[in-house]
Image (spheres, rainbow, N blue to C red):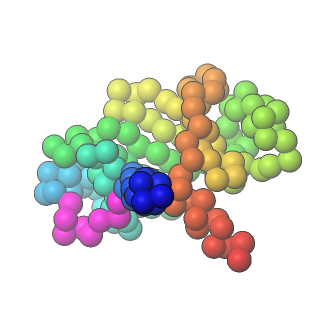
Amino acid sequence: MKNLMLIAALSLGVSGAFAQKMKEADVPAAVKTGFTKSFPGAKVTKWEKEDGNFEAEFDNNKVETSAVFNAAGNLLETEVEIGASTLPGTIVEYCNKNMPGVAIKEAAKITGADGSVRFEAEVGDADYLFDSNGTFIKKEVDKDKKDDDDKKKK
């Protein structure tokens, strides 16, 4: 029984460790410099650390945006919020077929440093990732997002 409780506690700790909010003072100077060079004049509203990389959330020309940098300050990808109606038709069809009656809450276009494009559709408590052609790649469930949604329902 003790082992089960320990495993459950560790699982909760690990699942909450995927993205960690950070104070700006804890963000490496190289990352802040990389952000300033990539997005001059933009103000970060939230920093997070995930898998050794640093994600900055900010508004870019009044559009919700996030950018991921490695510890050296190199931009890895940029995620820009888009309207669900601007997603490729194959993505909308996939969501309608596989999650009937559930609306796409948010959508984003993700552009890698190499110019590659992916799309993200938030449906329920999960993010569905698609390639540039609208082909499904994978589903990611964000525990923090699910917890926030559960709190809103109460």
Name the spot of residue 105 as percent of width and height, x first.
69, 54
| 41 displayed left or right of 60 | left
Most foreground residue, 14 or 106: 14
Above/below status of 133 relative to 129 = above
Above/below status of 6 relative to 113 = below
Name the residue: 20% across, 52% down.
31
Q: The C terminus lies in which quarter of the figure?
A: bottom right
Name the residue: 29% across, 65% down.
22
Magenta highlight on residue 51: no
| 138 displayed left or right of 61 | right
The region drawn magenta spans 19-27
Magenta highlight on residue 20: yes
* Residue 32 seen in the figure: yes
Above/below status of 67 relative to 119 = below
Most foreground residue, 21 or 132: 21
* Residue 63 seen in the figure: no
Name the residue: 46% across, 45% down.
79
Displayed quadrant of residue 112 = top left
